[in-house]
Image: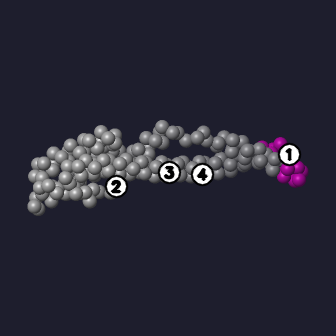
Amino acid sequence: MNKLQALFVAVTLSQAGTVSAEQVFYFPTKGQSPEQVTKETDECSTWAISQTGFDPKKAPSAQALAQENLAKNPAQEKSHDRAVLRGAARGAIVGSTVGRWNDNDRTTAGSVGAVAGAASASKGAQKQEAQQEQARQQQALQQAQATLDEQNNTFNRAMAACMDSKGYNIR
């Protein structure tokens, strides 16, 4: 009986694949031999794959699936250039105003203000874009993991239904 129990654990672990989801164990209730257990587990696995379209042994990692989804759905166009132009315009206005108050050349002061405003806006826009991209990648990873978990659970339900019909207790 110990050899038979070891076989069940090995068969069950082989079904787990690369997906991190709930593990399912199958125990014979009709005195099936180890060879019969292996045969029926393989049959049920093939059937469950055909029913669900998902093979947990060939499933990609959540990271790989997330990268694939990110590649299919590129990030929105960046507004970096618009932010720099807005910063330059604000800087030019402030510079020319300050130049007028200080009796300096308003054109030179406006130019200096435009450069300073553009630089400041560029730095802020880059930081915001980096934060948005990081959040986008994190969301893609969470969605990929949820998708893999759902597919694995569906596969496990199909596998359990098949094994149950062949006389196994499922835990």
Kindly report which numbered mark, 1 or 3, lies closer to the viewer in this rendering.
3
Residue position marked by numbered label 4 in the rendering: 127
What amino acid is labelled 3 in the image? Gln
- The label number, if any, that marks residue 105 in the structure image: 1
Q: Relative to residue 58, is residue 99 drawn left or right?
A: right
Residue position marked by numbered label 2 in the rendering: 21
Distance of label 4 from label 1 (alpha carbons) = 34 Å
Distance of label 4 from label 3 (alpha carbons) = 18 Å
Q: Looking at the figure, which quarter contains the N terminus?
A: bottom left
Tell me which residue sits at (30%, 47%) in the image.
158
What amino acid is labelled 2 in the image? Ala
Residue range (magenta): 97-111
Kindly report which numbered mark, 2 or 4, lies closer to the viewer in this rendering.
2
What amino acid is labelled 1 in the image? Asp
**25 w.r.t. 133: above or below:** below
Tell me which residue sits at (85%, 50%) in the image.
97
